[in-house]
Amino acid sequence: MVRCFLIHTVCSVSALGAGESRLLYSRLFGPDEGICSDRERGLSPEERRLVQKERIAVVARQVRSAVSLSREASSRVLVETVPGEETLALQEADSGVVRLRAGDPFSEEMSALWLGVQSLGFTLVCEPHENLLLAEGTLRNLTRHCLEHLHMLGQGSEVLLRSNRVDALLSRLLPHGQLLFLNHRFAQALEKEVAAYMAK
Amino acid sequence: MYSHGAESLIKQAREIQESELQRFYSRLVKLLQGKELGHETVDSLQRLHLILSATKYTRTLPPELQRKVHLLLSSPKEHFQVLSSAVLRETLPLSGQEGNYNQENISQLNSHAAALLLSQAGSRADLSSLCAQLLRSLESRQSEGPAHSLTHTLPILNTILTLSPECLTEDHVTLLSKKLVDWLRYASITQGGGASSGGFFTGPRSRQPVPTAELDGAVSGDFFTVLCVGQGFTEDQWMNVYSFSMLRHWLLTYHSVSSCNGTADTANRLQLSLSLSHSFSNDDRSEVDGSVVSMVSATSSFGRLLPPKERLREKSFQYCLRLIEQSDRKAHRKTDTDLQKACLVEAVCILDCVCEEDASLVFRAFPCIKALFGRLSSDLSFARVLLPIAQFYLNHGEMAAVDCECVWKLVFGRFPAELFNDHFLAHELLRFLRLNLKSLQRQVPQYTHSFPNLLKFLAWDSPAVVDDFVDLLPSLVTAGTAVELLHTLLDLPCLSATLVLQVRSTCLPISEPGGRGLQSPDAYRNPSFRGLFLFLLRGDAGSGDTIDRLSTLHELLAETADWPRVVQCAQTVPLLLHIFFNTVITGADEKLLSHLILVMLERSSLLLNIPEYNKEIHRVFSSHLLRFCKLHPSLVVDQSHELLEFAGATANVYSKEGIYTHVVWVLGEYLSVSCDSRCSVRLITSCFEALEAVLFEITSSVPPPGADCPAPRVVTTLMSALAKLASRSHDLIPRVSLFLSKLRTLTRGGSVAWCSDEEDLVAIVTRGEELCSLLKAPGVAQSVLTPPPHVTTPQWHRDTNVAMPLRLRALTSLTHSQ
């Protein structure tokens, strides 16, 4: 299962401290993992939500640091792309995976796959026994759709003001966090539905 | 991409004033009251979502607004379903609305409303009732609602059982096993969606069912799988995709060896295979099997007589074999080729899982796995597929008596050597090692000798994999390879630089006009230095601990000391050294420890010159030298020659102050007869003379150009060491006293060339005086300077001398009224 999908900054944001990451979109899948743990069972829904938010903030921070270390090590020059060059932006994107130890922040070990497109990171947190090849492909596909449908290569803030599009996209390609084995025909059928949603 | 506009939007959402927020709420309520909900409502709901989600503190909505939003969950327009679900997920459920998990029926809800219900579940009981509802709706054959309403059942179930597998009862598991079998094995093999085989003028009457196709265009000859394509798809074909997508997790959850009663299964199977008959059950859709049957389905004709769980296992087995066969076809599109790879991984993992459960399947699976390995092993682009195959070999190779040498050659040989820069492979390979450590240590003897190769992952991308090595390193430490491993760890930054050079030389042309004037790439290609680099790049341990010309190598790589990868690697080495030493010290014999001390002394001046790196390594060495000697004091006498040589070199005071201090300290502390009977008076005297000479030199001259004054700690440690040695061989006492009084005289003048701080000087002189007066009473001096163990390790209540006062004190405090 995919536990969550995040879109967050991987560049430095002036309003935040160094190493902090601003979350632009977050979606947790499934029931809260705390309801079955002894430690968190007694929490109120408010406290649960707080814990969830803190968890994904931790993930975003760890991915941010992984991205900046990776970019520093490879000494790559970030290519600035403009709207219309989504395919190029995706090709130039760097990717990796962060091992999140059990307890830090999820109760079990997780793998956070990330895709860094210029100043933003797209992260998929999944259970380590998941098919990471499939997860990687799904992440790339989701990122491509987000870049295109939300015009993310431009200066707009559609990712904030049209987050319902990402929700709709996820409900087709990653329903309730389920990674799907979609060949191009199945994918086309789902993408047609997504496109129809976006058009309205 | 991330603009000021976005940042200020978030800021506004977080800092919205209460009054403005209330106005916004009432505006939204009015909008929602209208008959037609249009773009303005969508935008406002979106803004509401932004306001709610921008802060981690929960905002509650006014009840009227929340009720209206809740109603939108069942709106015919999907935008409102999505937005209302998103908004309600960011706030608390209305009091009175929680706990209605028994009344609502999740199977009647659309996907977005179901997501909300899932996120609000508060207990296992809620999840159990959701499961029960979903399975009840699956049971009833006629599914109402749009075609996709059934498809979300499986993802929802999967996410629930990730958290709490006990939510499904035994009956539920049986029911779902049957359904999964139907969808996986008996989905229709004709294209759905009204695809017709005729042309433009063909009317609906001449519509004939068209069979599905394979990815290379051929007509499908066997049952439907995720690798089959068609113009459109039927509902059960969609369910085939959803079923396969969750199959591995299902099998891992409900088919693990512990959850099955192995003996009952085998008995059943034996009985059934003896009474083989072709009975068709009514629920079985296998009657519609086409006449074209591939080998896969034919070999297991008695599968349909098995109980549901076993049947699912059998059908999963067949599905995987078919996928492996289908993955050999050449797909037309890249996304399909990628999917084939992912399917191979999944198929092998599922086969591994079912073979764990039922060992008899191993003999059916192995030929296929072996063939797959043979097909893929020479192609490194399939490396990530070969890892699950390696797992299969590890789990079942022994039982099937298959030779796994070639697999391990790949995993421990080619993969780290050639694919060290593939992040995902590194992650998966290291995970494979971590999860199978015990089996690997047992079945793969070359594991512990493969560290030069495995460390390449670390040398290339330290931040990403250091965590894995923290877990793996202890298993790589063996008595036979410990020394070589230490040398390898110390030279990890060099390996890092070499790998960078290797990658660059393969990417760039041979004759690069020396644009940046770098020395290292030329050195890398220079035949006379080839041996040095080849040693670093070696794959296996055992060909030598290290090389003679290490200093040459360090010189050649000197300019790489500021390369980011090298710096990142250097930062992880101290941590790994700590782990190495901590592992070695448990259960290592003295011979190994003394050899390691030698290595520490030797390498303290033989490190790649990266800022801070040397200092950090020295710090690690110092602390572990201390630990070794504390544990085995006789080591000092053992290695006295080398330690004396190190301590007698004045240059070390200035260049390796930290480690020098510790060496002097251990000499002073442990060079005594009580620690090792081999310690002779002559040894003590020669040590004394060596240290005295150094102390004399550093306190009578200016530090060499470029060096700082020796730290006061070095001076006092030397003095204390001399005093300790003298207390053991009393003829040396007069020499020490003389020296210390001379020192006092010299420093009375005020400042000296070798100490810049007056306070420090005072401290040094004071210490000298204390030592002097101590040595005036030689008998006492020894026990003060080197107290016997029973004094330094008090036993508290176990010690008869100490116990009485403690007991009295305890009794007093108990009996005294407060």
Image (tube, grey):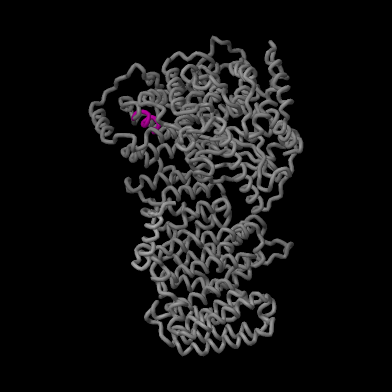
Q: Position of residue B618 (x, y in %)?
A: 56, 68
Q: Position of residue A104 (x, y in %)?
A: 53, 44
Q: Residue furthest top?
A: B205
Q: Is residue A157 visible?
A: no
**Would you place residue B416 above or below residue B708 in this image?**
above
Assign the N terminus of chain B to one quadrant of the image: top right
Q: Is residue B436 visible?
A: yes
Residue that appears at 42% across and 73% down: B633
The magenta segment is B310-317
- In the image: residue B299, left or right of residue B702: left
Residue that appears at 36% across and 25% down: B174
Q: Quadrant of residue B275?
A: top left
- In the image: residue B611, left or right of residue B620: right
**Would you place residue B169 above or below residue B30 in this image?**
below
Which SS does the magenta portion mostly show? helix
* Residue B678 or residue B735, whichever sits in front: B735
* Residue B83 or residue B801, whichever sits in front: B801
Q: Quadrant of residue B25?
A: top right
Residue that appears at 50% across and 35% down: B329
* Residue A103 or residue B22, whichever sits in front: B22
Q: Is residue B199 magenta?
A: no
* Residue B477 or residue B687, whichever sits in front: B687
Q: Position of residue B747 (x, y in %)?
A: 65, 84
Q: Position of residue B804 (x, y in %)?
A: 35, 64
In this rendering, the count of numbered labels is 0
